[in-house]
Image (cartoon, grey):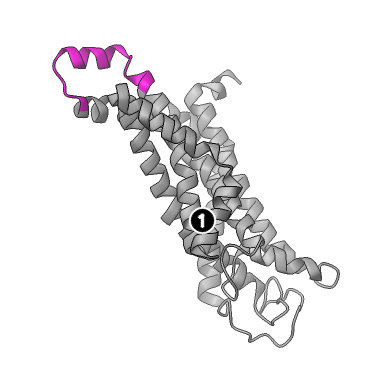
Amino acid sequence: MSGRTGRALARDWRCWLALGLLAALGALTVIAWATLPGPVEQTAPGRLLGPSLAHPLGTDELRRDVAARTFAGLRGSAVVLAAAVVPGALAGAALGMAAGVIGRWFDGLVMRLVDVWLAFPGLLLALGILAVTGPGKTGVGLTLFLFMVPSFARLARGQARAEMTRDYVLAARALGASTPRIAVVHVVRNAWEPLATHLALMLGVAFFIEAALSFLGLGVQAPEPSLGGMVNASRQYLREAPFYLIGPAAVLTAVVLSLNLLVDAVQDAASGGLRRR
């Protein structure tokens, strides 16, 4: 990230708000893990109890602590995203960069494969993968991985093709620089900022997809907690225990809002929109 972009981010309240929310959620996750009962332990004195000091968000229909399950679900979602989205982004970016730098027949082959990949609706692809692997973290992780690759491949290819026409790349090639050196020293070095911004955006999308699959019963399986599964389970108790929904819904909202604010801040800082305002 350039110094100008970093200074613009440091002046943007959205960046600080997003980082603050994410840091607060991380701290609450650690505190919940250290102080609250286990997410599957049925140790509460009653079911659907209201918030208290012992159970900050109350208990669920099986006498489990809602706060403990909420932050355990957040921790599980973070692990799935780290294990699936980041590798998918790296694989797609590497494939797109290679296509943009090498060009010719390799570029055409990769882009046609990406076009075929994107021709399948995301939901249909997810259902097909989960039909083979079965519901659970493995299927969700594979779905998110395959969802990331074509998106990052197209973006990285476009950035690489644009960088390959720059004067400094043409000068390096005229001086005898090899294609791998041009790719590493010039293309990747100057094209990674849009990819980083896209990663923050896709993390929010993937977080929502993971929660949606769990809501439908295709993601994390009971009794292991998941935010989407908790939202689904709380629907039938909205009248007698509305607090049951508050925890997982608030965490979902905070994570997606934080990532979207961070994306907007980075985009404005990189494009100079913040200075114009």
Q: Is residue 100 above or below residue 195?
A: above
Q: In this view, does 158 lie to the left or right of 136?
A: left
Residue 265 at x, y = what percent? 55, 34
Residue 212 at x, y = what percent? 64, 55
How dense is the environment of label 1, judged by Cα within 10 Å: few (below 14), some, or many (20 and up)?
A: some
Report the residue at 61% width, 58% height from top. Answer: 213
Residue 10 at x, y = what percent? 49, 35
Q: Is residue 1 visible?
A: no
Q: In this view, does 7 lie above or below 87?
A: above
Residue 183 at x, y = what percent? 26, 28
Q: Can residue 82 be seen in this view?
A: yes
Report the residue at 73% width, 78% height from top. Answer: 61
Residue receiving disc 1: 129
Q: Is residue 133 left or right of residue 44?
A: left
Q: Give the range drawn in magenta.
A: 161-179
What secondary structure is the stretch in magenta mostly built from?
helix
Q: Which amino acid does label 1 sit on?
A: Ile
Q: Is residue 238 left or right of residue 205?
A: right
Q: How many marks?
A: 1
